[in-house]
Image (cartoon, rainbow, N blue to C red):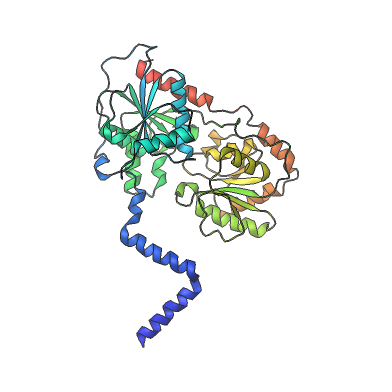
């Protein structure tokens, strides 16, 4: 009898959650049983540093200024549309424009095909000339090497033991990618390595200083206002836009999903547009656009009123790109973020569902949406990544040649 009751109870739960719910529960059990979560950990155990070395080998002499340098850049394998890789490759291009030779060292703990990744770089970042190599083949014959994330900092120590100058181009406060556990400490220890630290923007510089007490070279946050711009003529703007990354906690997806649900209750007539990764659990009408090119994204920003620009580890590129197209970004408020984005057209919101929904509501009910859009776009005209490129180039050259 008990067995019959148990079977009936399971059947009732299955009916309540539906086919999708049953499939999710089966997938979750398989996920847990197989340890599939380990795939998100992007560095092999043997490549993790056991301690922070006090010093690392550097060249006994410095080259004379004017001699072109060979500079390595270490990162995880790039995927089309990756904002972090796009920012990094802008710096690579800047050094190449100065006549230096660059080498891209990619890493995948499960193995990588360097030729296939070279093809990805040539197709999606065609102005980058750098050679592509596998980190595990060794990092050598360089004047300098640049880490781009916590995993790459570990790799540089392990695979780059010949004398060279070492720097660390930091785009996010990466310990906050995780709960305070092993991954947090693996990331945090990299800031204590004997590398020269370069922080992208004052917010990140402040976070590193607050949590570690360490000084960094700070370089300005940029915006590609040539690629993102106000459409002409301006279309009739309606609705909101959201960049969806459910698997990245720093993007605040669960918070944004609840905020969009509450916004929809307030304004059921306003369309909701989502791009990036497929949203999960968003139970309100929305249009999903998938991955978009820069031109497609500019067009979407240019016909919507406002959008969520969420990030908790540095300001997001999305905010100023929205502004350039006349879209009013709603940004989760963090005190240090104002240092990077001191723009009067940004709507800062308390990072709660009601706070974000209220800011979106205020934007779509504003008195003159077209005038607001024009003013927002005008506020970032002329903004570019050139000051960042110049600053990073100067820092790397000074580190190798000597000041």
Q: Give the side of residue 267 with respect to residue 76, left or right.
A: right
In the image, is residue 226 above or below residue 399?
below
Q: In which quarter of the image is residue 9?
A: bottom left
On screen, residue 349 above or below 21: above
Q: In which quarter of the image is the N terminus?
A: bottom left
Residue 206 in sight here: no
Position of residue 380 relative to residue 264, above or below, is: above
Look at 25% across and 38% down and name the residue there: 51
Looking at the image, can residue 333 be seen?
yes
Q: Where is residue 165 in the image (x, y as percent from the top left)?
A: 32, 23
Residue beneath the point at 25% across and 32% down: 53
At 48% from the left and 66% from the top, the residue drawn is 20
How many discs mark residues in the rendered view?
Answer: 0
Quadrant of the image containing the C terminus: top left
- The image quarter containing residue 369 is top right
Find residue 110 and report its horizontal and vertical position in percent: 31, 45
Q: State the residue lying farthest toward the bottom.
A: 1
Q: What is the x, y in percent for residue 247? A: 45, 51
Q: In which quarter of the image is residue 260?
A: bottom right
**What x and y, as percent, mark residue 115?**
36, 35
Question: Residue reaching furthest right?
Answer: 367
Q: Looking at the image, which is closer to me, 130 or 199?
A: 130
Q: From the viewer's perspective, is 310 left or right of 11?
A: right
């Amino acid at each position: 009898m008990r067995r019959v009751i148990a079977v009936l109870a399971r059947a009732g739960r299955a009916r309540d959650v539906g086919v999708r719910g049953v499939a999710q529960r089966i997938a979750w059990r398989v996920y847990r049983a197989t340890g599939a979560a380990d795939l998100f950990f992007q560095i092999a155990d043997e490549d993790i540093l056991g301690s922070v070395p006090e010093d690392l080998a550097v060249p006994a002499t410095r080259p004379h200024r004017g001699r072109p340098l060979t500079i390595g850049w270490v990162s995880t394998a790039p995927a089309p549309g990756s904002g972090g890789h796009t920012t990094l490759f802008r710096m690579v291009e800047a050094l190449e424009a100065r006549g230096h030779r660059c080498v891209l060292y990619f890493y995948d703990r499960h193995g990588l095909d360097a030729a296939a990744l070279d093809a990805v770089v040539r197709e999606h970042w065609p102005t980058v000339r750098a050679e592509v190599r596998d980190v595990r083949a060794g990092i050598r014959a360089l004047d300098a090497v640049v880490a781009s994330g916590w995993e790459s900092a570990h790799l540089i120590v392990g695979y780059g033991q010949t004398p060279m100058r070492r720097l660390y181009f930091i785009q996010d406060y990466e310990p906050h990618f995780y709960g305070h556990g092993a991954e947090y400490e693996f990331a945090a220890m990299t800031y204590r390595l004997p590398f020269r630290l370069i922080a992208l923007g004052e917010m990140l510089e402040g976070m590193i200083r607050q949590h570690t007490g360490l000084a960094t070279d700070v370089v300005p946050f940029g915006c590609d206002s040539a690629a993102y711009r106000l459409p002409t003529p301006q279309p009739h703007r309606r609705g909101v836009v959201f960049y969806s990354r459910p698997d990245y906690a720093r993007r605040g997806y669960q918070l944004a999903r609840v905020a969009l649900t509450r916004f929809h209750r307030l304004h059921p007539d306003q369309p909701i547009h989502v791009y990036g990764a497929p949203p999960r659990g968003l139970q309100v009408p929305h249009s999903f656009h998938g991955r978009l090119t820069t031109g497609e994204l500019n067009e979407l920003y240019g016909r919507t009123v406002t959008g969520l620009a969420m990030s908790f580890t540095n300001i997001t590129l999305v905010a100023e790109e929205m502004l350039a197209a006349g879209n009013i970004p709603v940004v989760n408020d963090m005190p240090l973020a104002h240092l990077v984005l001191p723009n009067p057209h940004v709507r800062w919101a308390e990072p709660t569902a009601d706070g974000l929904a209220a800011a979106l509501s205020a934007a779509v009910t504003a008195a003159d949406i077209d005038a607001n859009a024009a003013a927002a776009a005008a506020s970032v005209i002329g903004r570019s990544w050139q000051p960042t490129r110049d600053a990073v180039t100067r820092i790397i050259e000074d580190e190798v040649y000597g000041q």
